[in-house]
């Protein structure tokens, strides 16, 4: 687990420039103020939002080499990890959510920070004719459901990056009954209980 105790430390460890660092600070300020009126994230995560939201999200970037990759953050909620990737200058990031209050927050952040994100107000299963190079998600659903959502958004070389918790291996065991996939697991840098699941070659069994 990475030792992050300040925005300056985060800036140094992830090579953020001054504008990116300021944008992260503004994002956290808006998240905190909006959360008093709208339930964007759990209150406990705002005790240390730099670790809970920013560090947890920013670690995804090390698994995506091409900053022009087509990335979709499904069930993005308050925009994690998608907004953080956009702040890091990934140029083709889409955020999908079906909660209109969270969509309004995302639109506010997009405008305030001048981000190039695409905001899609939709249920994931209602999306059609869209394919992405990377599908990312955090705390949305179990692996079976994530694979169901991801398959229709994938092409042959799509990579999946999911931020998961302690139940990951039991979810993998269940998913292997219905899906074929190659995977690796990395330890999360934000939480010793967390894992980053990397998946390639997703196929439905008997499809």
Image: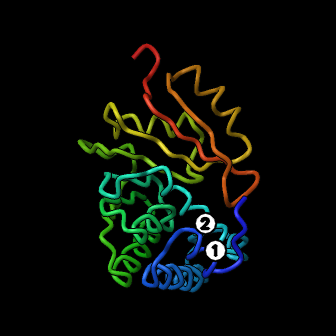
Tell me which residue sits at (58%, 19%) in the image: 177
Is 168 above or below relative to 93?
above
Q: Residue 38 appears at what percent x and percent y?
A: 55, 77
Image quarter of the N terminus: bottom right
Is 114 above or below relative to 168?
below
Residue nearest the viewer, comparing 7 with 164: 7
Left or right relative to 203: residue 194: right
Which residue is label 1 attached to? 50
Do tag 2 and tag 1 residues touch (Cβ < 8 Å)? yes
Is 7 above or below relative to 164?
below
Left or right relative to 97: residue 127: left
Q: Choose top left, top right, bottom left or bottom right for residue 125.
A: top left
Residue 59 is tagged as none
Which one is earlier in the sequence, the residue at label 2 or at label 1? 1
Q: Residue 121 appears at what percent x and percent y?
A: 35, 61
Tell me which residue sits at (48%, 57%) in the image: 61
Q: Residue 155 appears at what percent x and percent y?
A: 31, 35
Left or right relative to 58: residue 126: left
Give the structural element (helix, strand or loop) at label 1: helix
Q: Residue 27 appears at what percent x and percent y?
A: 50, 80
Residue 55 is tagged as 2
Is 202 above or below relative to 16?
above
Give the structural element (helix, strand or loop) at label 2: helix
- Distance between the Cα atoms at labels 2 and 1? 6 Å
The residue lying furthest to the left in this view is 129
């Amino acid at each position: 687990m990475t030792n992050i105790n300040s925005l300056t430390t985060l800036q140094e460890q992830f090579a953020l420039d001054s504008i990116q660092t300021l944008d992260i600070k503004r994002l956290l300020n808006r998240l905190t103020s909006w959360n008093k009126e709208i339930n964007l994230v759990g209150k406990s995560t705002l005790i240390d939002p730099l670790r809970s939201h920013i560090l947890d999200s920013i670690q995804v970037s090390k698994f995506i080499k091409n900053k022009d990759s087509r990335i979709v953050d499904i069930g993005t909620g308050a925009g994690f990890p998608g907004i953080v990737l956009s702040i890091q200058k990934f140029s083709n990031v889409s955020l999908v959510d079906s909660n209109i209050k969270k969509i309004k927050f995302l639109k506010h952040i997009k405008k305030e920070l001048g981000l190039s994100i695409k905001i899609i107000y939709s249920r994931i299963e209602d999306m059609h004719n869209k394919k992405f190079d990377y599908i990312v998600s955090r705390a949305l659903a179990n692996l079976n459901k994530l694979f169901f959502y991801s398959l229709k958004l994938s092409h042959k070389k799509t990579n999946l990056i999911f931020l998961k918790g302690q139940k990951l291996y039991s979810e993998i065991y269940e998913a292997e009954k219905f899906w074929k996939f190659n995977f690796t697991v990395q330890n999360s840098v934000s939480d010793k209980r967390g894992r980053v699941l990397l998946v390639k070659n997703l196929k439905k069994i008997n499809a």
